[in-house]
Image (tube, helix red, strand yellow):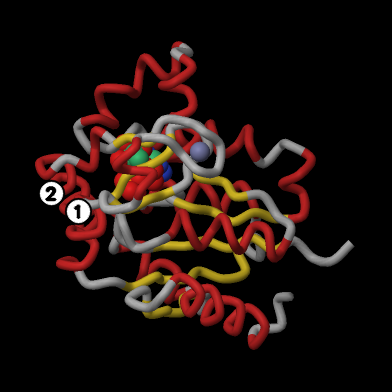
């Protein structure tokens, strides 16, 4: 078995983390671990955890570090994560980054991609974003799936996330600057940070990231 490949993808909401992580997870055959997806699944299933976090998420606020740390802890115990994982939306605060380092060890994270996109562009992307409630596929408001409300991948309902409403978008981007941007220096200090321009087509972004992974001899 090759060494574990744990990659962190950082970037503002709407930078394209989810899209890229889905693709990279397939390319490297490691699971896509998205705390946002895990929390949304809990809300949808109406579990006690879901009931606890629903209002927080709708407002675009952050769920407590303890709670997401526990979620990720559990996720890394699953057999499929033993080869590594693509981390999307976690860590997003310094305490979470420290918890992850404690969980995986000093050498646990191999690379952190900063998927960089200007704030005007992410705001525009988030307001026009629609998602499939079943499979998580992302559409634009002008796509036929968004207009018809039906996912062409799985037939699920295509909706606008509550936290993609203007008020919540503003709140989330502010939290990014306050709580998540400091992680860039955290990973930079560890020599793990690489910036990738997120203002390119999805294919170009995937190419740029896989090139970095190759250059670093990680896969
Ligand atoms: P986005 O990054 O586009 O806001 P996500 O799907 O990553 O979307 O997360 C959606 C919501 O889930 C966040 O706004 C927050 O409420 C909660 N969440 C997800 N990951 C975390 C995390 N690591 N720490 C705290 N809250 C989180
Ligand atoms: Zn779908």
- Disc 2 residue lies near ligand 1 with CB under 8 A: no
Q: Which type of secondary structure does the marked residue at label 1 adopt?
A: helix
Observer-nearest of 181 and 160: 160
Q: Which type of secondary structure does the marked residue at label 2 adopt?
A: helix
- x, y (%) of residue 140? 31, 53
Q: Dot 2, crowdedness within 10 Å: few (<14), some or many (≥20)?
A: some
Please tell me in which quadrant of the rendered image residue 59 appears: top left
Find the distance from the CA under tag 2 to the CA under tag 1.
Answer: 5 Å
Q: Is residue 112 above or below residue 50?
A: below
* Res 170 label: 2
Looking at the image, the residue that sits furthest to the left is 167
Measuring 21% from the left and 47% from the top, which residue is drawn there?
Answer: 172
Observer-nearest of 172 and 77: 172
Measuring 39% from the left and 44% from the top, which residue is drawn there?
Answer: 145
Measuring 39% from the left and 70% from the top, which residue is drawn there?
Answer: 115
Q: Dot 1, crowdedness within 10 Å: few (<14), some or many (≥20)?
A: some
Residue 135 left/right relative to 174: right
For the residues bearing labels 2 and 1, Cβ distance under 8 angstroms: yes
Q: Quadrant of ligand 1?
A: top left
What is the tally of numbered marks visible in this picture? Answer: 2
- x, y (%) of residue 19? 48, 58
Residue 112 left/right relative to 64: right
Q: Is residue 183 above or below residue 70?
A: below
Please tell me in which quadrant of the rendered image residue 4 appears: bottom right
* Res 173 label: 1
């Amino acid at each position: 078995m090759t060494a574990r490949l744990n990659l962190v993808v950082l970037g503002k909401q709407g930078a394209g983390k989810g899209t890229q992580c889905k693709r990279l997870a397939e390319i490297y055959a490691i699971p896509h671990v998205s705390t946002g997806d895990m929390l949304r699944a809990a809300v949808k299933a109406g579990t006690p955890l879901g009931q606890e976090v629903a209002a927080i998420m709708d407002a675009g606020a952050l769920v407590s570090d303890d709670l997401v740390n526990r979620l990720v802890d559990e996720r890394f115990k699953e057999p499929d994560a033993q080869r590594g994982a693509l981390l999307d939306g976690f860590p997003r605060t310094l305490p979470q980054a420290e918890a992850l380092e404690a969980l995986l060890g000093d050498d646990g994270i191999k690379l952190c991609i900063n998927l960089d996109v200007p704030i005007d562009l992410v705001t525009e992307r988030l307001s026009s974003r629609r998602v499939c409630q079943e499979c998580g596929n992302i559409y634009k408001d002008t796509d036929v799936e968004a207009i018809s409300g039906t996912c062409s991948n799985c037939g699920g309902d295509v909706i606008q996330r509550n936290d993609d409403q203007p008020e919540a978008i503003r709140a989330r981007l502010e939290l990014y600057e306050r709580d998540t941007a400091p992680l860039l220096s955290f990973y930079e200090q560890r020599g793990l940070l690489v910036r990738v321009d997120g203002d390119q087509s999805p294919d170009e972004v995937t190419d740029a990231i896989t090139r970095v992974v190759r250059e670093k001899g990680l896969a």
